[in-house]
Amino acid sequence: MRQLRTSVAPMVDVTDPCFLRMTRLISPFGNHQLWTEMIHANAFARGHIHKDPRKLAQHVPLRELNDFGSGIVVQIGSSSPDDAYEAVRQLVKLGVRNINLNCGCPSRNVQMGSFGAVLMKTPQTTANIVDAMCLAARGSSCRISVKCRIGVDEHDSVEFLQRFISAIVERTRHVDESSIGIILHARKAWLQGLSPKENRTIPELNYERVYEMLRAFKTTSFIVNGGIDSVESVAKHLDTADGVMMGRKIQEDPWFLSKLDHHIYGISTEKLPRPLDVLQQYVRFADQMHNDHGSRYSVLGRPLFAFFQGRKGRALRANLTQAIAKAKTPRSTRQESRYSAPFSEIVLETVEKANAEHMYCRSSQRETLPMATSQSSGKQMTACA
């Protein structure tokens, strides 16, 4: 199996199946591993989400599993080996080939559930959960990994991190060591006094701590995460680490993946997808998600908020939010909300409006884009490439 060395980090309310579909359209070459937002293991062990196709489609990118299974990572959160075992068992049945345990989230709600970053304080408990995940995946091609911080609260020494990783490696020795991966966010987590957002910026980055772990655990795969936001920094870390993970950079500018395709993976600019083609394909996918799984327009529109940058991007966000609210009809007591127009039509008309308000390119660079659905009655729009 080809090892993908650049990854899009799991982000709550960001890396849902819609966002991952858009990133796949922006970068269709299979160069980047794409992570889902965290799913609680209880959703499988007790909520039986795998038996509800509509709910499952809102959390697991089923479309991507069909043609990019090796590049999709489903992250779960759990404090129970039994729940984690059942979640992995069901995910493997769905065809998931990479499953990760969240040991890095510092949010209060996650702490109350005794998972996320707080698990780093109990290495043996974490090791037992990971071992259960490995057992559930035995006999399949699924790989198990752990995403954590370099420390938590006052526990931020080299020795503490080594003990945590050692507990996982020792407990899972019955598995090929190379199949257990560690993703290290190069900041420690403060569980009290800092919000999740502040935990992404205030604790100092310490990449050297990550590299110390690489030297200490030579047979374990390590991916470095945290504050990596340029082609140059990606290339630098890839010289030493097994992989690089980026989160907020991709959330704010998903087209950065296209830059990596060109500068890191050598894809020629002629082969890189054009924004208009990506937009047209995405809105078709969004229409299908709404028709097949009842996805709300607000969820379908969220990945597009960073599609364009600058003034045009701000105009699109404001106009799209307003257009979706306007298109929503009153909710019936016995049926879901309906909309007065297809999602694709609303989006493409909103892009046209954003172009008119904030011209981003010369008229000679504008091109005609057919509407993506038959309901548009052949209407055409113009947009900047």
Image: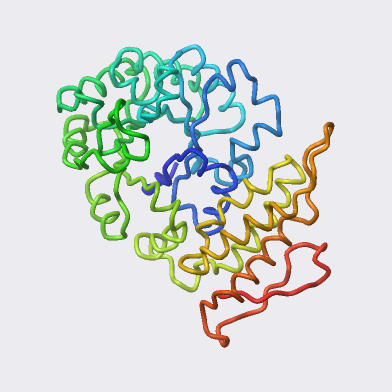
Please say whether residue 179 is visible from this viewpoint: no
**Residue located 24% across and 28% down the image:** 151
The foreground one among 204 and 15 is 204
Is 232 situated left or right of 47 in this image?
A: left
- Residue 55 lies in quadrant: top right
Q: Where is 373 relative to 356, above or below? A: above
Q: Where residue 280 sits in the image (x, y, percent)?
A: 65, 63
Q: Where residue 340 sits in the image (x, y, percent)?
A: 80, 54
The foreground one among 152 and 193 is 193
Q: Where is 114 relative to 294, above or below? A: above
Here the colouring is rainbow
Q: Where residue 364 sits in the image (x, y, percent)?
A: 57, 88
Residue at the extreme bottom of the image, as rendered = 364
**Residue located 82% across and 63% down the image:** 374
The foreground one among 312 and 52 is 312
Q: Where residue 108 sits in the image (x, y, percent)?
A: 40, 25
Is 142 situated left or right of 171 in this image?
A: right
**Residue located 32% across and 15% down the image:** 171
**Count of labels in the image:** 0
Q: Where is 149 relative to 306, above or below? A: above
**Quarter the N terminus occupies:** top left
**Residue located 79% across and 39% down the image:** 331
Q: Where is 208 relative to 29, above or below? A: above
**Quarter the C terminus occupies:** bottom right
- Residue 62 lies in quadrant: top right
